[in-house]
Image (cartoon, rainbow, N blue to C red):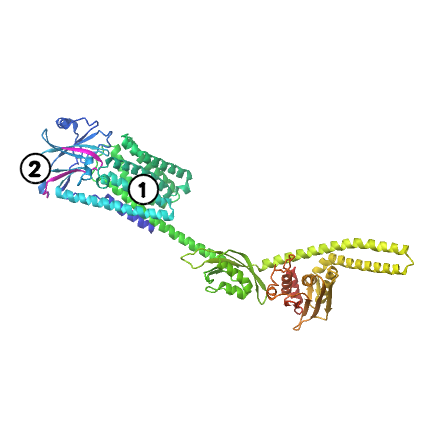
Amino acid sequence: MVVLRTLTLLVLLVGLAACQPAQEPGTLFIGRGAPTFVDPGGSLSPEQVVADGENLFRPSDDHAANAGMPPTGDTVFWVKLAIPSAQELSADGWTDDYMLSVEEPRIVHVDAYVVRGRHIGQRLTWDGRDRASAGSLRYPAFFLEASEVEGSFIYLAIQTYGAMRASVWLADASHFSATYGAEIFFLALLVGIMTGALIYLVALGANLRDPTNLWLALCLFSAKFYILTTNGLFETYFLPGAITTSRVMALASALLIYCAFTAFTSHFLRIPEMMPRLARAADAAALFFCVLAVLSPLEIVLSLNVWRFLGPLLAAAVILFAALLAAVSARRAPMRSLLYLAAWSPLVLCVILQLTLILLPGVGVVPFSASALYFSIAVSLVSFSIISTLDIQQRERALQRQIIANANRFRAFAEIGTDTFWEVDAQGRITFLSGGRIKGIALERGGALLDRLAEASSPDFAAPLAGAIEARRPIDDRRIRITLTDREHWISISGRPIGESPESDATYRGIIKDITLEVERESRRLMEQQMFTLGQMAGSVAHEINNLIHPIINLTKRLRHRLKGDAEIERMFDLIDLSSRQAANVVSALLTTTRSGEKWRNADRPLHEAVQYGIDALQPAMPSSIRIDFTSTEVPCIIVKAGDVLQVLGNLIANSVHAVNGSGSISVTLNPAPDGGARLTVADGGPGMSEAVLRRALEPFFTTKADGGTGVGLYIVQRIMHQYGGSIDIQSATDRGTVVALTFPAGEEPDAREQANRARR
């Protein structure tokens, strides 16, 4: 529909431009059929022309004579006019004296001679420099008294730097004044419309940074000055008498039209996207015309007369090159090429007509053929301004559809994923919320983000976030632990400050990710690496100690044989031998534990056996200053993996050893739980934990050890207990020690237990 409306508008504009006003009463076009001839050197005197007129003047057909462009500045174009009788004119409503006008604004000088027979009577002169005087007209016009020209001929000697045409009109004085005023009004209206379109295109092109509209604006700008200068408006009303300046501006504006027209055609038809080489050729042509425009003053100042021959050829070349670009574009964008041709067709047709009249002077002209060029320029350029507006609107609608489609696409991706996207205002209220919902956090629009996070975790986690958001600092992967009834969750928060926008109150935006599985994998990997390293180290130490114990035992035997008879020495040897053998047993047990650990790790065992195995495996690795007191009563048969219990006891006892500074007793108890199942406790008499440390004790990578602990021990214990459906409870206070109680639920059904085992594998 947009294309149809545009084509309809173009047809109306072209029709309007092509319309010629009917000849009104009181005006008469007397240039039609007037005899003419050209004096190339301007050497003939008026007397010679009048005397030899029958040989010089050639009768014309029903059109006005057209002699093309003058070859030099001295060329004189002669026109012989017969003035109708006053009786005939009075019958047509003429009531005043006459005004004889040559409606060609680019005329430099005109002499009008009133001739009766062979006698030259009155001589009237009009010079372009007279435009500096008050009341001057933009083209030559002579006042003739009806009684003085009755039955006579008017000889006109015309010098012009434009086309030499017999565009001569006769009118009574009152009708001439009205017609001239209407011409000025319509030319001013035409220039005003072009100025408005120019301002619009400049603003549009600068705002959108669109070179197409900017090149079209340059076309309008150049065309406006071309109309002002070639119509005589500039040197008549703006800078009276400045004929040379007007000529320079007319030539420069014509060349700038070629420049801008070529570049605009290339961008409008999207040639750079289709054929980059052809687009570079268009840019080179535009640059060439721009250079010629800069050099154009030399043509006028030095009177080179190059433009008289080069101008028509350049105009024809520009039209042919534009046709080539339109043909190339038609293969991929036929509708765009059609709009281009439709909008430029009035101007192109008028230019072709003008070139025909210049290159083929024998072709006659009709009234208004010259002024049609100016209207066609305005019609084409204003039409393209309308097309540019419609094109931008169409592109804007296409972009809006694309934006909506992308927004729906991104929203769908966000809803499919598990991440939550949020924005908050300066008060911390949620203004935008999209994507998945994190379990355990009641987020909603209008709610306070930090309050919801504090409720789901603790104020200790939310406080640093509040400071970062308030100070508008970036947040990078801030982890928060959320404890739910069924299991523990971990989330990661990242955010960035955003600039103020009139469309939104948001000042900060970010993403919340559920990283529970990631934290679990990372924690298990660290713990397995720690246990593997500890086992390797224990085996290596045990092997080295074993190598040292055997020489001690053997040497003790030899010394006993050599030093027999002394009871005291015998007693000492007995103690050395006993201690050495006990040390060997300990090392042997440690080696056995490290070598058979993998066999036990994945083995299903009753809970009490797995705990006993863990105590036996850990006891040899404990310092001599640490005593493990293990007490156990009969508990339900709960099947567990021995390796899991070893990990649990290893972490808890290691924490207790650190708490008592490597010296003291650690109590391990296995008893039935009050509500069924079993309860395993590990207690120490260390300094205990403060309330702030206790709240974060189960957080992964949180540690209070000055020697750089991993901070994953208690988290691993918690994860293992959750896998068994159990729970962990920590009771501690400053200077009161710590008790960690693990509750294992009653035994599972065999099928369920097997599924849990497979999941843990």
| Res 499 → quadrant | bottom left
User: Residue beneath label 2, please?
Assistant: 147
In this figure, which residue is indicated by the disc labeled 1? 219
Q: Amino acid at mark 2?
A: Ser
Residue 346: assigned label: none
Q: Is residue 520 visible?
A: yes
Q: Is residue 373 visible?
A: no
Q: Is residue 398 above or below residue 686?
A: above
Question: In the image, is 599 to the left or to the right of 430?
Answer: right
Q: Which residue appears at 25% of the width and 38% of the height? A: 230
Type of amino acid at the residue the image marks with label 1: Cys
- Specify which label sits upstream in the sequence, 1 or 2: 2
Closer to the camera in the image, 413 or 488 = 488
Q: Which secondary structure, mark 2? A: helix
Question: Could you tell whether 98 is left or right of 687 in the image?
Answer: left
Q: Which residues are magenta?
A: 93-112
- Classify residue 722 by image quadrant: bottom right
Front in this rendered view, residue 605 or 511? 511
